[in-house]
Image (tube, coloured by chain):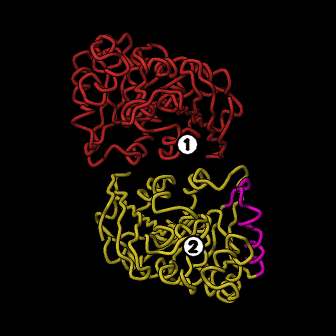
Chain colours: A yellow, B red
Amino acid sequence: MERIEHRASFEGWQDVYQHESTVLGCTMKFGIYLPPQAEHQDCPVLYWLSGLTCTEQNFITKAAVQRYAARQGIIVVAPDTSPRGESVADDAAYDLGQGAGFYVNATELPWSNHYQMYSYVVDELPSLIEANFPASSRRSISGHSMGGHGALVIALRNPGRYASVSAFSPIVAPTQVPWGQKALAAYLGEKNHDRWKQYDTVELIGSAQERLPLLVDQGLSDEFLEQQLRPELLRAACEQAGHPLTLNLRPGHDHSYYFISTYLGEHMAHHAAALNR
Amino acid sequence: MERIEHRASFEGWQDVYQHESTVLGCTMKFGIYLPPQAEHQDCPVLYWLSGLTCTEQNFITKAAVQRYAARQGIIVVAPDTSPRGESVADDAAYDLGQGAGFYVNATELPWSNHYQMYSYVVDELPSLIEANFPASSRRSISGHSMGGHGALVIALRNPGRYASVSAFSPIVAPTQVPWGQKALAAYLGEKNHDRWKQYDTVELIGSAQERLPLLVDQGLSDEFLEQQLRPELLRAACEQAGHPLTLNLRPGHDHSYYFISTYLGEHMAHHAAALNR
C-alpha cells in the first residue's frame, strides 16, 4: 500500500492510497480523510461509494466532507468505482465497465475476472482500513447514484455490519431501470433474474433482517429522476415492509455535487449520531 | 449574456454565464453564486480571482464557498483567469497566455489585443454584475496565488472601491519572482520596470492611499513558498509602511484547494463583517 497524495485539510489529512487488491486483481486507489482525532484514538469509518464515471477523486474534491468529518471525528473512505487497468475488461459506454462497477460480484465473462466490487467494498477494503489506519470497526456507508444503490444494497445484505446508511439520488430498483438492466445483464447474465434481485434495494427491503433506517435525499430537478432513479418505488417498498425511511425530496436540485454538498451536513449528522453512540 | 449552468446550492443558485467582453474582445465565462437573500434584496458581492491554469470552474466546484455565502447573503463572482478563444494569443507554457492573464493590462503585442484582465475585473465585470443581478455596489475581493496577487493589487490601486480584501498563497512580489518576471516581461515589456511595479503588491504598499487591512493565509508546505510566493516580503513591506496585515502561516498546508477550503470560512467572515457593516 502506497500513499500517493497527502494534503492537510481541516486539522486532519486528506490522503489517497493505492494498493494491490486481491479480490479485484488489480491496483486500486482510495481516498481517506483522517480527522484530527485519529492522531490519538481509533475513529469510526464512513464508506462513500461514488457514481458512474467517478474515481476516488470526485467525492474528496467536490463534496466538502472534510469539515464535518473533522468535527465529528469520522474517517471517510472513498474507493474508486470499479477495477481499473489495461488488463481489466472495459466498454466504450460510460455506464458499463471501468467507472461503472455497480458494486456487484460479476459472474459472467469477461467481467467476472475483475469486477468483484461487492466483495471489495464489504470485505477487503474494510479489512485493509482497519488493519492499517486508526480505524475502529464502527462503520457506516453512503453514496451517490450508482453508489447510493451500492450503499443501500450492501447495508441491507449485511445486517449488523453498518451503524447507519444513507444515499443521495440512489438507483433503488436497478432491475426495473435502463442503467441497472444493462449492467446487471452484462455482469450477472441476461436471464439470471434471481441474481439481479440480490442487488436491488426495492427487492431486498421485504426480506431485510434488520430495520436499519434509510436516509435518502433526491433532487426533484434531477435529469435521471423518472427514468433511472424512481424514488417512489423505494417509498412503496418501505411502506409495504414497514421499513423505516426518511425520503427528502429537494425542489430545484439536480444530480450534481452541488446537491450532495448542500445536504451532506445532514447526512453526516445522521451517521455521526449512529457512529458515536 | 447567456446562462449556461444553473444549479441549486444551499437554498440559492450556483450559475455560470457567458458574455461578450468589450474590454477583452472575446467571449468570457464567470461563475456567480446567488444566495437566497438575493431573491428579495440587493446583496454585496465578493469577487474571487483564481490562479494559474484555472477557469471559472475551479473555485465554484472545489472551495465549498456556497454554504458561507448563503448564510451571509453574499453574491460570489468567479471570473475566468484570462481571455479565451482561438483568436486569442496563447503560449504552450502553463504560466503564460490563456489561463495566466495575471490581472494586468498588457501593453505589448501580441498580448495587448486581448489581455486586459485588470480593466475587466475592476470595471467591466462589476458593471455587468451590478446592472444584471440583484447586486449592490458593496464589493470585496479575494483570490488564490496569481489571483491573490490580482486581488491585493486591485484593492490597493482602487481606494474606496472594496470593503475588504484577502488572499490565499498570493504572489506578493511578482517583480522579484520567476512567475511574475516572466509574465510581466511578456505582457508589459521586458524593460518597463515602472509598469511592472504598478502590479506588484510589495511595491504598492508604501504608496497605498487607504489602509485597507490585508488578510493573507499561506501554507507552510506550499511547494511554491520560497521561490514564487515569499510572504516575508509582504510582511516587511507592511511593517515598513505601517499597513495593517494579518498573515496566517499554516503548518502542513500546501497550495491546493484543500488549503483554501479549510480557511475560507475565516476569510468569508472577514468579508461579511466588512460588506454587511
**Residue at position x 52%, y 21% from top?**
B120
Tell me the subunit letter for badge 2: A
- Residue A222 included in the magenta stretch of the image: yes
Q: Main secondary structure of the magenta part?
A: helix
Q: Residues within 10 Å of mark 2 (few under 14, many from 20)?
A: many
Tell whether B116 sits left or right of A213.
Answer: left
Tell me the subunit letter for badge 1: B
**Residue at position x 28%, y 65% from top?**
A40
Tell whether B186 sits left or right of B177.
Answer: right
- Residue A93 included in the magenta stretch of the image: no
Q: Identify the magenta region.
A: A218-240
Residue B32, above or below A110: above
Residue B172, above or below A115: above
Between B28 and A47, the one nearer to me in the picture: B28
**Residue B150, percent from left and from top:** 41, 25
Residue A151 tag number:
2
Between B122 and B85, the one nearer to me in the picture: B85
Tell whether A227 sits left or right of B165.
Answer: right
